[in-house]
Every structure is written in structure tokens, then in C-alpha cells.
Amino acid sequence: MENDIIVAVATSRLEAAISIIRMSGEGCIEFVQKMFSGKIADKESHTIHYGYILEDGNKIDEVLVNIYRGKRTFTGEEMVEINTHGGIFITQRVLQICLNNGARLAERGEFSKRAFLNGRIDLSQAEAITDLISAKSDYSASLALKGIQGNISHFIEELKEELIKIITQIEVNIDYPEYDDVEELTADNLLPQSASLLKQMNIIIEKSKKAQLLKDGIKTVIIGKPNVGKSSLLNALLDEDKAIVTDIEGTTRDIVEGSIRIGDIILNIIDTAGIRETEDVVEQIGVEKSKQMIGIADLVILLLDGSRELNDLDQQLIEMSKDTQRIVVVNKSDLVKEKDNDKIYISAKDKKIDQLTDKISDMFESGLITKQDNVLVNARQIQLLHQASLYLKQAVDAMDLGMPTDLIVTDLYDCWENLKEILGERAKEDLLDELFKRFCIGK
């Protein structure tokens, strides 16, 4: 039931100084009053009260109880937070007392779900809460915080505002052509507005894709022929001996993975099997996996052996990776006689890889968004905006061809629906509301 009282431990279930047990639902303040020695039933919202949790008249724990009334709460309904001592046993005991008295254990994310259903947050803000909890860098956290603060809601509302201006003008011209104060619209009138809106959407989509890549981590593949130092480079980047390193060719036969941070940039690194012709069946499978990883990588690090001249296999790897976002790295730099400005020189074995990490920073830090940038932060949101832009593109193309406006408006409606869905809203009725709000029809 949506209006029942839900309860859950809001803090980590470890021994700590304090644990917080959170409740939400109509009447939860009176509910807690039955098990609390202090007086809270008639107290004001957003106040803290001292007392004891009681069971059958016996004191169970000394606590502080926070009460929140009305709709100015996180969930949009009455809430209580019980601050108990942080022992695992005592926290569980107080929780069980709440359950025994009729509260229901909250499902995962149910407090945020209620906040969404009660209009306290939209879907983009709910998703941002999860992103903030799972953030692995300052950059990821800053993106999530912008979402929680309503940044996404704000610029999506602005896009909706521009779109609905176009839609309502078309609808008035179609349904009420006799009105003298309504300008007759043609594709020529609509095209500049619609094209400008489409341009805004496409800019946001491109920035969002870059932001998502940097938030989730850059899938980075290290490739090279056998025994050039790929595993040594992986270990140097991770600063641990994760990959086996030997002088025997073909030691790495499968994918070895790890993640590192370079400033605000996260690299999800994959060390692949050395690519070469081989009769070893197991190694052949590893080589094929390596070739597949090149195709899905966000960044390819092509590692060459500085102690040897390039051979045909090196040239094949250079050709194979030429259309990727690639850094060509020469290992064993102390043995290189002549250096090329287009390549990065390192010594993986000695962990002298600063040139490489600096290069990666230069490549990707320019993609970090600023406080002024408008971006979406997950695949669902980006896909919906992309779909909205496709519908708007169809409408723009139709305008350019001079098609009647009553045929164009269908694509604009579909664009509107996708923008609404980014925020978790699906309603055509608001289009009618906007129509009557903006024009004095039926007066």
C-alpha cells in the first residue's frame, strides 16, 4: 500500500556511534509516539526530541527523534528519523520494535520512489541520487549533485517550453483559423524556431555522451605483439602486480582488467593477449578476444617495443587500430635511439609512465563539463533526448519540404512525449492546458 508506514535503517549496518532508522507515511509521528517516552505528537515540524524507545514499558535505547510534518519532507509525506546508538544489535532491536507495531520494511529505493510519486523530485533527480551514492570521483559526484539540484529538470523544461510554443501556435492555426489576432503560420515561420531547438538538443546530446564516458570510466585496451610489456604497463598503471610478467611470449592468454584514476578521469583498463599467429588453441582464443576488444574500446593504447625495429606484425596493429582513439606508446624508452614526436615513450618495467598519464589527461580533461554545461547523466536520458531529436529532425525536414503544418505537428507531439519521459512524466493533457493558458480561446 502506498500510504502505509515504511521503515528502514538509513545508515550502514556496521558498529558506529549512531544509527538512523527512517520512517515515512501518514500518521508515522503518532505511530512513533506509542513507543517513545518523549512528547512529539503535538510538536512542530523539523524539530529534535530526546527520550527513550520503549517496549512493554521497558527502556530499550536512549535516542533522539527528528519529526517532519506536511509536504516539506524528502518523501512529501510525514516522516520520522530515530537516532539510536550505533550497535548492530540495538539498531536491529529498535527496527524490530517498529515492525512489531505495524510498520512495513521499506523496499529498496522506496523512500526515493515516494518522493517521486509525491512530486518532490522528478525521475532525473531520483536517478541522480543513485549516481551520487555510487560516484567514484569528484567529477562523477559533481554531475550527480547537479542532477539532484534540478539542473537536468531546468534545461529539459526550457526545451519543452520552446517546443510547446511551436506546437500551440500550430494547433491554434489549425483549429481556430478565424481569429484575427493569430498570425498565419507557414513552414517558413516555424523552420527557424524548430531548427534552433534541434541544434540545442544535438549539442546537449554530444556533451552528455562525453560526460557519461568520463563518469562511467573510459574503456581502455592495451594492445601489442607478445612480450612488448603490456602486462608490465598494466601493473605500472594499477601500481600492483595484477598481471603475470615473464620473458616467455604468450604468457597473457586472456583478458586482464583493472581500474585507475588519473585526476578526475577513470580508466577501465584491459590488458589483452599479445596478438600474433599461433598454433596454441588457448592462445588463439585470447588473440581473437583482443581483436574484438579493439572494436569496442574508447581508448586504445598501442604498445611497441623500443628495443626492436618495427616488423610486419607491428604494422598490422598500427593499421588495425588506425580508426580508433589511439595513443601509440613505445616501451623500453632507454633503448630507443631516435624518438618520434608523435609517440609517447615510457619504461613500464621501471614504472616511468608519466608521459602516458599526462597524454591521457590532455586528451580527456577537455571533455570535462563546466558548471554552465547542460548534460544528461545516464543512457536512458540520453536515448530519450536522442529519440526526441530524431522526431524533431523529421519535423524540420518536413517544414523544409513545405509540407502542411497539420502533418508536421505529429512529430512534434512525439518529440514532446520523449522530453516528458526524461523527467518521468507522461501526459498529453498538459498540452491542452498550455493551449488554453497561452491563447484566449473560448472567452
Image: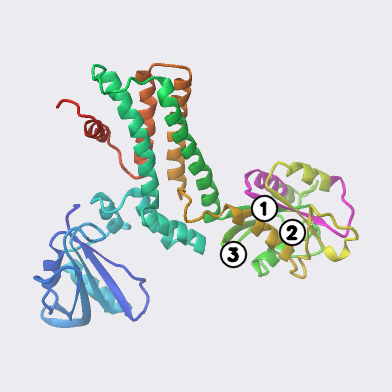
Question: What residue sits right under mark 1 in the picture?
Answer: 221
Query: Quick check: 276 left or right of 395?
Result: right
Residue at far left of view = 42
The answer to which of 261 and 56 lies nearer the viewer is 261
Query: Quick check: 36 left or right of 164?
Result: left
Q: Residues within 10 Å of mark 1 (few under 14, many from 20)?
A: many
Highlighted range, magenta: 287-313
| In this view, the mark in front (3 or 1) | 3
Identify the residue shown where x is 36% and y is 71%. 12
Among the two numbered marks 3 and 1 on one chain, the one whose residue lies closer to the N terminus: 1
Residue 208 is tagged as: none
Q: Amino acid at mark 2?
A: Lys
Picture quadrant where residue 331 is located: bottom right
Query: Quick check: 71 left or right of 168?
Result: left
Identify the residue shown where x is 30% and y is 75%. 19
Question: What residue sits right under mark 3 in the picture?
Answer: 263
Identify the residue shown where x is 84% and y is 54%. 340
Q: Are marks 2 and 3 in contact (CB under 8 Å)?
A: no
CA distance for labels 2 and 1: 10 Å
Q: Amino acid at mark 1?
A: Val
Where residue 279 appears, x then y in whole percent? 80, 47
Q: Are marks 2 and 1 in contact (CB under 8 Å)?
A: no
Among the two numbered marks 2 and 3 on one chain, the one whose residue lies closer to the N terminus: 2
Element under disc 1 = strand
Q: Amino acid at mark 3?
A: Gly
Picture quadrant where residue 16 is located: bottom left
Where residue 201 appears, x then y in whole percent? 46, 39
Question: What residue sits right under mark 2 in the picture?
Answer: 230
Among the two numbered marks 2 and 1 on one chain, the one whose residue lies closer to the N terminus: 1
